[in-house]
């Protein structure tokens, strides 16, 4: 019985005379009169199939990628069983990840008759009008799988389907798959035009041949079909092969690696060669036991800030895993071909790992494969900048469909790694102006002046007059029009994206890469590899050094503003443009893209240039970042206050999480408290900041509120002598409470430098407060 016929039957049973064939309304009337249990019993009787037709079994004999149906009956299951093609019958209540990795799945979007109970009529089983009020499909995980299948399929075939469901209409129309979509409908009767003849062509080609004729034609094609044997290669995914042990690195190899970022992959295994003093890179991964964790079914994220070694670590790990027999793949773009090859990688025998350098733009790709990998030895090894990972961790766990994610931060060298860096630079003569220093002095340079960060060590080498002169000479040979491209490539890398040709041409006017001469290309070979559509920067640190130390502020800001507005225009084309806008808008990223000489003026010029764009005008993130920038320059607090007010106002309008605004506003309040000469006003500012920080440290496991809490020390130093006993006790209690909460943090967070700094500042503040309490004769309560 068709849906329309069933609707008319329900109307008749309910005693309603009408020409209407709305099944939702008819079933609602029937349920109102006879009850949900009676309706459920009737549905089971009507929609339970006894014997399928031959044309149905013929269709189920085909190797469908996925089957979706809005029908309640078990016709497809019975047809599949007849030809030995068992289906996994699922509904929206079932988790996709439990089925997609192996089974031939048939999703019953509106519910399955075999599972029907009276309670299901409220929502899970789409029949009555009230059940249709629950928009279960578009908000379910299956909706995402449905969209993904539509994008990847070579052909989409609707059999006997009239696009009656509005949810399906919206999704199919938004995916724009008209050129590969076909509707098999009944042959015309009487020569008239039906509503389907007018409506369905909006979504695809209509074939009015009927299901029986369709099955017959398919059967004839199957008889003649001979599958083609083709060699399948990986193109969108880069297959990492095991690298044989190469030669011993030379001085030139190390100079190119340290100063220009030229990584020779064939030299990575040289660490295992006979000469222990001529190693190529410091081994920072053996102790992490990466393979062991991957075998234990953990995905891994390696974090560090720009230039601190995560990309080199990824190359070391990929070489080691490939040598141990793993299927190792790298992916840099979320494309249709990448997803198809990802599905092939899922089916490979043995252990498979996918490596992604900067996972943020590929979260949808990760989700696509994660939902299909259940029961397979398939893992992800990802890298990202530390502060970005903190913001995206929840989203990553959703995409991976697990909370079993091992994170390793490479921002700081251990003592032994610092010693190896000293030895490595010594062995290859790269210390230049620092060559005369003792090993102890060099180690102190790395651990103290460079804060044990590889990024800072490299910048220190660039600042050496000998090396700085060499780098300056290289950049001076680049013509101005090419320098703009180089600046743009540096900015894109600083934003966290990869500098491919398309992105560079899109974000600069006139597609300038097309016009580069051979001489121009030669002049920038020391900066990037230009091959296969990608411009891979060799050294992020060298890019930062140019932007912050050698670049002209006016030129860099001009390029940055142009790129921002071009990215805004391109936002509808891809998510990477939106990501770029948000990244360069963040002051933490922006300050690494602008010259230190004139940084304040360049920063203000950029923020005010983009201030009137539709994206920023009412964007709370923009106003927060501008406030952070001005606060970092110690600008007039009266000028900064309206930026926080705007951030809060626009956050309220857009349901924006105000955690970051609150955090930085607390910092702003403590700066006000420290600068304010009137102790009464100052104390009120402190109290407001205290309220925010106590709330954030109550459950927070990150360092942000503790970094801000350190600002209490400046307030104490300014006003400790003016605080009355009651106020002094209040500040003492706050400092003590912060220390208690630090003591309850996980060990890795207690040793965070911001948290350790906060603990030290709290002790100093307490000492000053207690000293003045003794001087004034008061006895504050602790």
Image: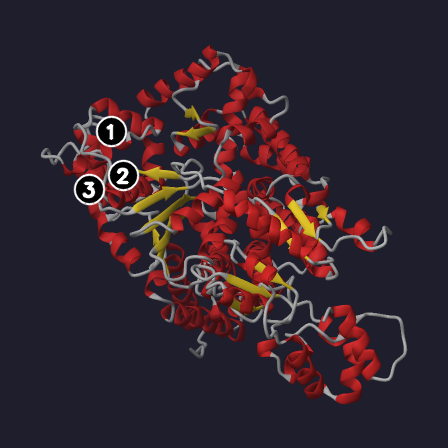
Which quarter of the figure has residue 530? top left
Where disc 3 sits, the SS reads: helix
Q: As displayed, is residue 537 above or below residue 736?
A: above
Residue ranking furthest to the left: 274
**Label 1: few (<14), some or many (≥20) within 10 Å?**
some
State how far apart marks 2 and 3 are (Cα): 11 Å
Q: Quadrant of the N terminus?
A: bottom right
Q: How many marks?
A: 3
The first of marks 2 and 3 along the sequence is: 3
Report the front residue among 297 and 228.
228
**Label 2: few (<14), some or many (≥20) within 10 Å?**
many
Which quarter of the figure has residue 742? bottom left
Q: As displayed, is residue 25 above or below residue 144?
A: below
Residue visible at 67% across and 60% down in the picture: 655
Report the front residue among 631 and 270.
270
Q: Position of residue 606 (x, y in %)?
A: 62, 35
Q: Are marks 2 and 1 in contact (CB under 8 Å)?
A: yes
State how far apart marks 1 and 3 are (Cα): 15 Å
User: Which mark is drawn over residue 419?
Assistant: 3
User: Which mark is drawn over residue 445?
Assistant: 2
User: Which mark is drawn over residue 48?
Assistant: none
């Amino acid at each position: 019985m068709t849906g329309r016929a069933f609707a008319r039957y329900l109307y008749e049973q309910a005693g309603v005379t009408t020409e209407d064939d709305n099944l939702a309304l008819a079933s609602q009337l029937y349920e109102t009169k006879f009850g949900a249990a009676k309706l459920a019993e009737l549905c089971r009787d009507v929609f339970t199939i006894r014997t399928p037709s031959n044309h149905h079994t013929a269709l189920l004999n085909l190797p469908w990628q996925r089957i979706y149906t809005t029908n309640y009956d078990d016709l497809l299951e019975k047809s599949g069983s007849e030809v030995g093609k068992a289906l996994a019958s699922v509904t929206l209540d079932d988790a996709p990840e439990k089925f997609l990795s192996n089974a031939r799945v048939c999703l019953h979007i509106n519910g399955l008759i075999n599972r029907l109970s009276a309670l299901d009529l409220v929502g899970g089983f789409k029949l009555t009008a009230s059940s249709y009020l629950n928009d279960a499909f578009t908000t379910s995980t299956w909706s995402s799988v449905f969209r993904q299948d539509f994008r990847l399929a070579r052909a989409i075939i609707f059999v006997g389907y009239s696009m009656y469901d509005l949810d399906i209409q919206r999704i199919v129309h938004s995916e724009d798959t008209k050129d590969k979509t076909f509707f098999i409908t009944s042959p015309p009767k009487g020569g008239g035009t039906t509503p389907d003849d007018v409506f369905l062509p909006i979504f695809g080609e209509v074939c009015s041949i009927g299901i029986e004729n369709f099955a017959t034609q398919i059967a004839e094609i199957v008889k003649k079909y001979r599958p083609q044997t083709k060699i399948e290669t990986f193109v969108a995914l880069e297959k990492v092969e095991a690298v044989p042990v190469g030669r011993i690195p030379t001085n030139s190899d190390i100079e190119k690696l340290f100063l220009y970022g030229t990584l020779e992959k064939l030299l990575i295994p040289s660490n295992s060669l006979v000469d222990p003093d001529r190693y190529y890179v410091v081994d920072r991964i053996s102790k992490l036991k990466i393979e062991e964790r991957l075998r234990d079914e953990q995905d891994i994220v390696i974090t560090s800030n720009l230039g601190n070694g995560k990309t080199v670590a990824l190359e070391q790990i990929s070489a080691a895993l490939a040598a141990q027999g793993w299927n190792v793949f790298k992916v840099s773009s979320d494309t249709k071909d990448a997803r198809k090859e990802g599905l092939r990688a899922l089916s490979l025998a043995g252990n498979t790992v996918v490596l992604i350098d900067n996972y943020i733009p590929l979260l949808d790709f990760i989700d696509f494969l994660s939902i299909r990998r259940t029961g397979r030895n398939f893992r992800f090894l990802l890298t990202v900048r530390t502060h970005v990972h903190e913001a995206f961790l929840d989203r990553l766990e959703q995409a991976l469909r697990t909370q079993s994610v091992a994170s390793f931060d490479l921002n700081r060298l251990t003592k032994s790694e610092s010693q190896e860096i000293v030895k490595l630079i010594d062995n290859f003569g790269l210390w230049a102006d620092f060559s005369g220093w003792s090993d102890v002095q060099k180690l102190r340079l790395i651990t103290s002046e460079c804060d044990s960060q590889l990024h800072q060590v490299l910048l220190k080498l660039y600042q050496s007059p000998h090396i700085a002169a060499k780098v300056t000479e290289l950049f001076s040979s680049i013509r101005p029009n090419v320098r703009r491209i180089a600046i743009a490539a540096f900015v894109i890398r600083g934003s966290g994206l990869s500098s491919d040709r398309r992105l560079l041409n899109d974000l600069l006017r006139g597609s300038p890469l097309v016009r580069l001469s051979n001489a121009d290309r030669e002049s920038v070979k020391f900066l990037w590899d230009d091959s296969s559509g990608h411009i891979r920067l060799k050294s992020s640190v060298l890019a930062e050094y140019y932007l912050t130390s050698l670049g002209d502020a006016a030129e860099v800001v001009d390029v940055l503003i142009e790129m921002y507005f071009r990215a805004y225009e391109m936002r509808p084309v891809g998510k990477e443009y939106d990501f770029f806008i948000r990244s360069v808008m963040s002051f933490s990223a922006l300050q690494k893209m602008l010259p230190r000489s004139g940084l304040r003026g360049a920063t203000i010029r950029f923020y005010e240039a983009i201030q009137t764009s539709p994206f920023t005008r009412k964007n709370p993130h923009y106003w927060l970042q501008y406030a952070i920038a001005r606060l970092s320059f110690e600008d007039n607090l009266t000028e900064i206050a309206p930026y926080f007010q705007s951030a809060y106002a626009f956050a309220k309008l857009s349901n924006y999480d105000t955690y970051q605004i609150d955090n930085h506003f607390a910092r702003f309040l403590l700066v006000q408290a420290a600068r304010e000469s009137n102790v009464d006003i100052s104390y009120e500012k402190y109290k407001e900041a205290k309220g925010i920080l106590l709330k954030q440290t109550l459950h927070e496991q990150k360092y942000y509120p503790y970094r801000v809490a350190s600002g209490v020390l400046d307030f104490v130093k300014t006003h400790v002598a003016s605080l009355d006993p009651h106020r002094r006790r209040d500040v003492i209690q706050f400092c003590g409470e912060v220390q208690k909460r630090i003591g309850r943090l996980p060990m890795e967070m207690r040793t965070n430098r911001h948290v350790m700094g906060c603990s030290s500042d709290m002790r100093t503040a307490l000492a000053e407060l207690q000293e003045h309490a003794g001087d004034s004769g008061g006895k504050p309560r602790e």
